Image (cartoon, rainbow, N blue to C red):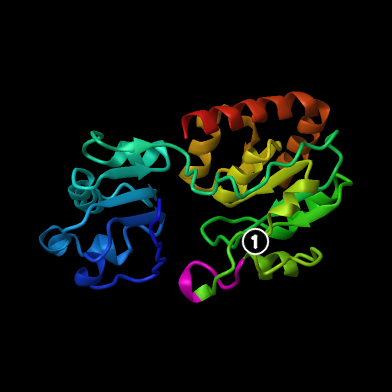
């Protein structure tokens, strides 16, 4: 309340940080590459203001990384990891909160009423991912074969230089797949027309659940598997390289659309209540 907020994509000097009332550090699998983490040897000697760490996930079970991360666990006012796998690889669990990243679950994003049946548009998010043998065109084709309109939902709009694992961002990939007008910025109204949300990105799934839409994700990353398992929706977390499974999942949702919407709506309400 009544605080100015600065968003910094780099590590400022300690003197600049110490002019703040609170430092909030996040998130995702950029950890441990953030400069805040790599300065852990000098951090406690020079940072005099409280800090919180939110929404991090471990890329691998690396003892060196885990031990350095553990040094940060007992010091912040709040330390949050966004999946159970990250919680389990840290040496000590004390003081760590684990759960879905709810940072996008704010009142500024409207909740649209669910579609009346499952044959409305499918919202699709795909990202470039080089660590698996899979075909984005085949997944897009599986959605098209459902007979529904396909609405693109890019979630990452930055330059490839910011992610060494990609050559193009979501917008460029979806455009190459022939999807009409993938905007180079986020627009939540795409969810208003959605019957089903198919997303590779974690936040695309969270936003689909927030909108009480049936969601389909892919098990290429532990955080995705963990999310679906924790929500009791594992049957909708599919292999990336089996597009036939995507067609089957869409058909399964349509066969009991009201029932799946009811399940997701209950999950959404529970996350709001505990978030």
Asked whether 113 or 64 is in front, the reply is: 113
Asked whether 177 or 257 is in front, the reply is: 257
Place of residue 267 in the rendered image (x, y in percent of width and height, measured from the top left): 59, 29
Place of residue 89 in the rendered image (x, y in percent of width and height, measured from the top left): 30, 40
Residue 242 appearing in the image: no
Which quarter of the figure has residue 232?
A: top right
Query: In this figure, which residue is indicated by the disc labeled 1?
Result: 186
Which quarter of the figure has residue 12?
A: bottom left
Span of residues in magenta: 161-169
Q: Is residue 20 left or right of residue 200?
A: left
Place of residue 188 in the rendered image (x, y in percent of width and height, measured from the top left): 68, 54
Vertical relation: 77 (above or below) 153: above
Vertical relation: 188 (above or below) 195: below
Residue 58 colored in magenta in the image: no
Q: Is residue 120 left or right of residue 237?
A: right
> Extreme front residue here?
2
Residue 97 appearing in the image: yes
Near mark 1 (Cα within 10 A), the count class, few <14, some 14-19 or many ≥20, is few
> Extreme right residue here?
147
């Amino acid at each position: 309340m009544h605080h100015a907020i600065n968003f910094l994509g780099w590590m400022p000097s300690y003197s600049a940080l110490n002019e703040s009332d609170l430092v909030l550090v996040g998130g995702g699998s950029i950890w441990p590459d953030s400069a805040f983490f790599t300065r852990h040897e000098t951090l406690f000697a020079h940072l005099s203001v409280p800090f919180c760490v939110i929404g991090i996930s471990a890329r691998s079970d690396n003892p060196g990384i885990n031990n350095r991360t553990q040094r940060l666990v007992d010091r912040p006012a709040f330390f949050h990891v966004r999946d159970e796998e990250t919680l389990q690889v840290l040496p000590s669990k004390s003081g760590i909160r684990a759960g879905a990243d709810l940072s996008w679950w704010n009142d500024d994003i409207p909740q649209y009423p669910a579609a009346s049946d499952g044959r409305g548009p499918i919202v699709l998010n795909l990202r470039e991912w080089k660590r698996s043998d899979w075909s984005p065109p085949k997944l897009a084709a599986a959605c098209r074969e459902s007979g529904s309109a396909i609405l693109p939902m890019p979630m990452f709009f930055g330059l490839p230089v910011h992610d060494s694992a990609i050559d193009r961002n979501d917008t460029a990939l979806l455009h190459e797949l022939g999807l009409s007008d993938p905007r180079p910025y986020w627009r939540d109204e795409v969810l208003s027309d959605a019957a089903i949300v198919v997303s590779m990105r974690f936040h695309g799934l969270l936003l689909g659940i927030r909108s009480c839409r049936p969601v389909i994700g892919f098990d290429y990353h532990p955080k995705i598997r963990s999310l679906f398992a924790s929500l009791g929706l594992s049957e909708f977390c599919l292999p990336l390289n089996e597009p036939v499974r995507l067609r089957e999942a869409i058909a399964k949702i349509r066969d009991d659309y009201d029932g799946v919407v009811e399940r997701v709506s209950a999950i959404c309400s529970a996350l709001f209540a505990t978030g």
